[in-house]
Image: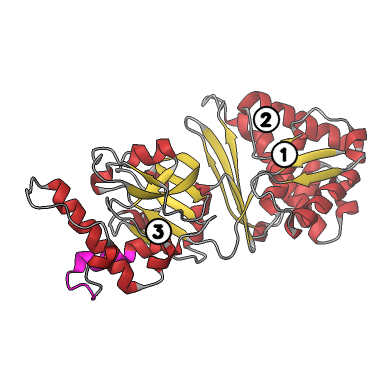
């Protein structure tokens, strides 16, 4: 039985999105990227979960950190400030900057959880970093930030998903969240802001929305027809999904590719279909159905893989290394792809394989899905 790893992020409903700035003038941007971590530029902070649960104790820790920073940054001859937070005042802050500091500490070390999406904007010409928090907050996880060997900072460990997204490629209405501190802010989840996942993940599933990125790095720039086979494959698989949804896959499988597309391609299933051909080129599909983009990605990969009709008849199993816990979405997707592939007639399979071969040879077309 063939196994297809769809490598598609299934975004949980409770995932939160945080924009984290890498210090003043983005001075820790490269350190974040290289060391898979994020932190607040609050050297000397030594907070723990118990302290985070109390506003008063949090204020004591922050006052301690401020005192230690002021001491080490100056050449003061006075004694070293206390490293015992209990010796500091716990009353509300009067100064705005300290109130903001307390809010930032609560967000990064208290509210941000494992699996939350992290966005780190660089300067205008640096790529935007996208990652996920991989470990619970550990008060003992500390590091010396560059240029601050005198005091450590507490950090959160991050696994970077993408580090190659140019800020200019992100819509300006989303970029506005990258333009102004505080050091950490939450990007609210809603249908408009959820578009950010198209830049964080090459393939994802949300309720009633899915996305797939198909790389095409070998476009020559001289022959418009080089994209034809890839476009036909993608369009045909959208039509196949529509036929399955309508319960008419047997009728669909008896039509040639162009007739099947004409009768079953449903524009209402597609939110956007983008083709960009510069260096490198790519296609992207945003669908109004939760499984459609992953269906297209998996089927496109199968069309480009040298497998026999007999292998397809043995069945398809779906795995997902990007979201290892088995979900109902993967089970349904497996049933859909298995049904589709087993219904295909020899002539259609032959044409799909030929168009897949051409798309691969002409464009080096690639999807997230991999046949194991």
Which of these two is toward me, 256 or 109? Answer: 109
Which of these two is toward me, 101 or 53? Answer: 53
Label 3: element kind? helix
Left or right, residue 109 beside residue 153? right
| Residue 199: x %, y % from top left | 49, 47
Magenta part of the chain: 91-103
Image point 44% across, 64% down: which residue?
111
User: In which quadrant will I find the C terminus?
Assistant: top right
Label 1: element kind? helix
User: In which quadrant will I find the N terminus?
Assistant: top right
Q: Earlier in the sequence, mark 3 or mark 1?
A: 3
Image point 22% across, 71% down: which residue?
89
Tell me whether the residue at label 1 lies in contact with that at label 2, contact meaning CB atoms closer than 8 angstroms. yes
Residue mark closest to the camera, 3 vs 2: 3
Left or right, residue 310 beside residue 178? right
Left or right, residue 302 beside residue 310? left
Q: Looking at the rendering, which quadrant does residue 331 occupy? A: bottom right
Question: Mark 3 packing: few (<14 Cα in 10 Å), some, or many (20+)?
Answer: many
For disc 2, the marked residue is 359
131 part of magenta stretch: no
Which of these two is toward me, 143 or 354? Answer: 143
| Residue 184: x %, y % from top left | 35, 58
Residue 60 visible at all: yes
For disc 1, the marked residue is 300
Label 2: element kind? helix
Q: Which mark is residue 108?
A: 3
């Amino acid at each position: 039985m063939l196994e297809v790893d769809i490598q598609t992020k299934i975004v949980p409903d409770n995932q939160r999105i945080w924009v984290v700035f890498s210090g003043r003038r983005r001075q820790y941007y490269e350190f974040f990227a290289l060391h898979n971590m994020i932190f607040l530029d609050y050297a000397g902070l030594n907070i723990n979960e118990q302290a985070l649960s109390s506003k008063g104790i949090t204020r004591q820790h922050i006052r301690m950190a401020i005192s230690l920073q002021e001491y080490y940054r100056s050449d003061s001859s006075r004694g070293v400030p206390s490293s015992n937070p209990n010796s500091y005042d716990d009353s509300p802050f009067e100064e705005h900057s300290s109130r903001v500091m307390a809010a930032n500490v609560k967000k990064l070390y208290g509210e941000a959880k494992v699996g939350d999406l992290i966005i780190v904007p660089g300067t205008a010409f640096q790529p935007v970093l996208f990652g996920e928090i991989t470990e619970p907050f550990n008060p003992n996880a500390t590091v010396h930030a560059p240029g601050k060997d005198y005091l450590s900072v507490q950090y959160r460990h991050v696994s970077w998903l993408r580090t190659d997204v140019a800020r200019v490629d992100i819509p300006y209405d989303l970029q506005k969240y990258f333009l102004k501190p505080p050091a950490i802010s939450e990007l609210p989840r809603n249908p408009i802001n959820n578009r950010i996942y198209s830049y964080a993940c090459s393939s994802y599933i949300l309720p009633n929305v899915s996305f797939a990125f198909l790389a095409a790095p070998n476009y020559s720039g001289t022959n418009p027809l080089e994209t034809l086979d890839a476009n036909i494959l993608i369009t045909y698989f959208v039509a196949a999904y529509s036929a399955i949804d309508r319960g008419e896959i047997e009728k669909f499988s008896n039509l040639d590719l162009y007739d099947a597309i004409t009768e079953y391609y449903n524009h209402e299933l597609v939110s956007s279909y983008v083709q960009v051909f510069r260096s490198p080129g790519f296609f992207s599909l945003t669908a109004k159905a939760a499984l459609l983009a992953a269906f297209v990605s998996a089927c496109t990969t199968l069309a480009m893989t040298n497998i026999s009709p007999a292998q397809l008849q043995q069945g398809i199993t779906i795995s997902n290394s990007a979201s290892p816990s088995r979900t109902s979405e993967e089970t349904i997707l497996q049933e859909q792809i298995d049904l589709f592939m087993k219904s295909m007639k020899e002539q259609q399979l032959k044409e799909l394989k030929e168009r897949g071969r051409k798309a691969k040879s002409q464009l080096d077309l690639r999807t997230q899905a991999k046949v194991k």
